[in-house]
Amino acid sequence: MEATPEQLERKKKKEEKVQLQSKKKSRREEEEKVVEEEEDYRDPLTPSGQKKRLSAIMPKNYKPSNVEKCWYEWWEASGFFVADANSSKPPFVILLPPPNVTGNLHLGHALTAAIQDTMIRWKRMSGFNALWVPGLDHAGIATQVVVEKKLMRDRRSTRHDLGREKFVSEVWKWKHEHGGNILKQLRRLGASLDWSREVDKIDIKERKFLNIPGYDKQVEFGVLTSFAYPIEGGLDEIVVSTTRVETMLGDTAIAVHPGDERYSHLHGKFANHPFNGRKLPIICDAILVDPSFGTGAITPAHDQDDFKAGKRHSLEFIVIFTDDGKINDNGGAEFSGMPRFEAREAVKEALKKKGLYRGAENNEMHLGLCSRSNDVVEPMLKPQWFVNCDSLAKQALQAATDGENPKLEFIPKQFLAEWKRLSHVFAFVSHQWLGNIQDWCISRQLWWGHRIPAWYVTLEDDAEKDFGVYNDHWVVGRNEEEALAEASQKFSGKKFDISQDPDVLDTWFSSGLFPLSVLGWPDDTDDLRTFYPTSVLETGHDILFFWVARMVMLGIQLGGDVPFRKVFLHPMVRDAHGRKMSKSLGNVIDPLEVIDGISLEGLHKRLEEGNLDQKELVVAKAGQKQDFPNGIAECGTDALRFALVSYTAQSDKINLDIQRVVGYRQWCNKLWNAVRFAMSKFDTDYSAAIDFNLETMPFSCKWILSVLNKAISKVVSALDSYELSYAASTVYSWWQYQFCDVFIEAIKPYFAGDDPAFAFERSSAQDTLWVCLDNGLRLLHPFMPFVTEELWQRLPPVRGHTRKESIVTSEYPSAADAWTNEEVEYEMDLIESTVKCLRSLRAEVFEDRKNERLPAFAFCKMRAVADILTSHNFEILTLAKNLSSIQIACKSLNYQVADGNYSSIKYLLWPLVLGEFRIECKVHRTVLIISRVVAPPPPSLKTYTWPPFPFPSSYLYMQRCHIQIIQVRRNEEIGVLLSGEDAPPAGCAFENVNENLAVYLKAGEKVNAEVELVKMRNKMDEIQKQQEKLEKKINAAGYKEKVPPEIQDKDTEKLSKLVQEMELFEKESERLEGEKSL
């Protein structure tokens, strides 16, 4: 029975519904599968401080933010960074130069962290009891100024309104906030510091009006004011001039030049002070007074030159200012309490009223302005604490210069000269010799910092009760209890009170004690006995004397030895244009902005939140837009660290280009994918076998282990000598150019299928891959800690061994002599050179046929070279890619040599040793050098065969010998052509590999003989120039007498290679000329 239309319609709808449901189900299953796959690639959530939980499947791409999370918290919680004072391991100690607490870290700090962490991780992995001590500079002046500004902005109050105790409490709040930011940044940079030891260490040309803080009206500067002092008796006057007329309230004498006849009648007389009646002696001083200027009023308490004059003439020192810049009682009741610049105008008016004002004129002057407050800085006599540096400086100088093995070494050595030459940080005058330094003032009139440990004793029977008036009333102690005890002994039987000096220690003094104080000094602690002196101080050369010299002086004096054995000084970081980092230029970069990435808008926002004025903000934004038009890409910590360390080869400054950091981030992705490829070749149940038979391993496996061994030796040697840039480039080169570019490509055919013919090679390649990954990641770890930990944790286990818990505590690789194979390395070098030339030919001539498989030909002058290429046909075809075949030929050579005596056969033998020869000769005196190993002189008559083993003839030559050639004949087997041809076929593109080898790619009519000839002639011209230059050098007068024999040998070898290369090009030109004429 046929279905009705309605039934057919219902059936159709039902089928469509089933199909739709089926599609939905398939889509849902597909989505669930995708989600499941995404889950496999996603790291599970890791609780804070626990070991990172990795995804089941290694993600396809490297993402820094994913890789770098969780590891540091686990490292720190596991105590991997903690040093043990009771350990039997040899100590290695570094101090972190304390960053300033008032701001965030910049890229200069990141450079310090990267260098120091590289060193400490390497030493920790190398079996040392590695201690890296963290520090944070309390930055006395900077911190106090910042907090005072904040108080004024937020509360309209000063530190005096709060009082010392509450103000210091506010500073601590600020410190915890901003110091915490710095500590977070250090952790993000991977700095493996021992946080259990965290400590704090605490010109104007003419008249001009300036805005000065605290004054409503502008203040006039650049003015020389003249006024008269009446001479005692009222019959004469003497006119003096000054730029600071208010300081005349503290004048105690008037000076004239002894040779100035204008004032000779006043010698020994007195002038009267117009405001207080003080008698001012008129004295002669040729040092202070310039005769062309005339006279000089002396205010010993408020001018450096007047201070010295006051000492010379035993004058009274009268301070007329309070600490907050107001006139004190010594200035007289008329002016007392006035701010200094208001007093300036008041004194002028008072002088005019007394008829003593004599006018004003423009005067060029140097005006000191505080960089933090913009207030005027002027001298004022204050009691200060000083350190006599004479003996300290001599000891510091001797530590670096005495004997062949001084206690203190500078790296780079050029800074030893700076150590000897400069000492301006200890003196008021810059650029003095270290042997002539002045006393070091260590007290600062601040509230924030380490307070001076000195107390002033006020006796009940003292005539004057002002604080500090008697110099012999001071006692010192580590605390008030000790000070009281000393005062009781010093002033026995007297009643007294004591008050601590309100000043604080100079920040650099506190910093100078850092190597001692962090280890428990002055107590005799286990840490001090184990870790002092420290191993190396790494810092910027800009604080060589601000900090380094002070640590050395105090360390020797108080610790009995230099505080560190080596001083490693890194370059200063500049931007890509070589400019200093400056907020006003907009080129100051927060390391986290490079690690996490930031948009241009984000960079602008940071500037807007700063304290730049509007003009500076416009300039800074324009600079950011020029340098970072698209912002800064996410680079990650590892890439930033590696870039910074790689830059350290530059001696004095680093022109940091962020794009270089981006390049290393891309390289991290290549590293990630290389390891991911290797992991895909390990079976599910694979466990590494590290005991293998090197002799039976595939050629490429022998080679990668040999070059890995060489890389390990170079990296360790470079780190030992603090050549961090070379160490970084060496490990990079091994990973990039040997492991990734060659080894991985060479072994891919082993894993192309389950071909049983490759079973042994496949197994060997797996074990070699594991060994390379394990050693390579450990070798790279100090430079790139995060990605290496993540990848190392994914490696399969070792058969019969228990691995360390973390790469942090694993052993740093060491060279294994058994892995070294110079012959294999030489053969692979030849293979790589051949492959490189074949690839170059394809890219240059056959760019449009890059996927076409072409036949190749190799033409050799030496049988040994031909043998190498023939035995490694598999590697050449694998690495060159897209070759259909490679045929290898060895060219016969015919030379005629006459008998005769030769005083030197160096030039004669070079062409002879291109092939294999049997040379019978009578030897009178011979030195035979084979691969730079000198053989003993042979007997007087012997038969030689060159080469005695398959090695390039360029390593073989005879030197300084006198022989008689008896017979030269070629081995019969040399005439065999391995490819069956004596010349490459027509239509080939040519490339010269070296003096013994040329390669060709067959292209038919594709090759333009005329174009190839032009290229060849250009190369021949270049070879000719090099040859002529070298011949000129060799034939120069005195060459044989003055140039060392080993250099002569190298020049001879190089000349021979050039001659042979020219011969190859000449013959190839002849071939192309022949093709051109067809």
Image (cartoon, helix red, strand yellow):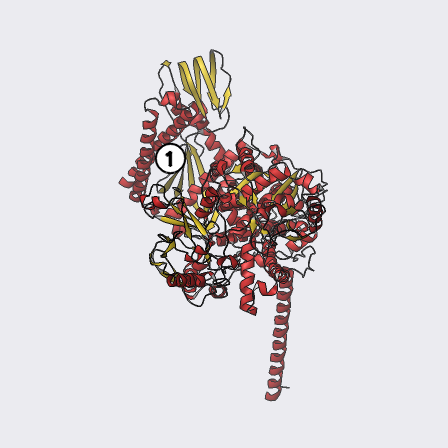
Instruction: Check disc 1 and report the residue beneath it.
Output: 983
Number of marks: 1
Tell me the amino acid under the disc marked 1.
Answer: Ala
Q: Is residue 724 visible?
A: no
Residue at 49%, 56% in the rendered image: 320
Question: Dividing the picture into quarters, in which one does residue 179 lie?
Answer: bottom right
Q: Is residue 790 left or right of residue 608?
A: right
Q: Quadrant of the C terminus?
A: top left
Within 10 Å of disc 1 (Cα), the crowding (few <14, some 14-19, many 20+) is some
Q: Position of residue 637 (x, y in %)?
A: 56, 54
Residue at 53%, 44% in the rendered image: 440
Q: Is residue 734 left or right of residue 840?
A: right
Taking 849 as reference, is 936 above or below it? above
Q: Position of residue 107 (x, y in %)?
A: 51, 53
Question: Dividing the picture into quarters, in which one does residue 984 lie?
Answer: top left
Residue at 42%, 37% in the rendered image: 858
Q: Is residue 1059 visible?
A: yes
Taking 981 as reference, is 429 above or below it? below
Q: Position of residue 927 (x, y in %)?
A: 46, 18
Return the residue nearer the eye: 159 or 249. 249
Q: Position of residue 825 (x, y in %)?
A: 52, 35
Taking 700 as reference, is 47 above or below it? below
Return the residue nearer the eye: 327 or 483. 327
Determine the secondary structure under disc 1: loop
Q: Is residue 911 left or right of residue 663?
A: left
Q: Quadrant of the N terminus?
A: bottom right
Return the residue nearer the eye: 805 or 109. 109
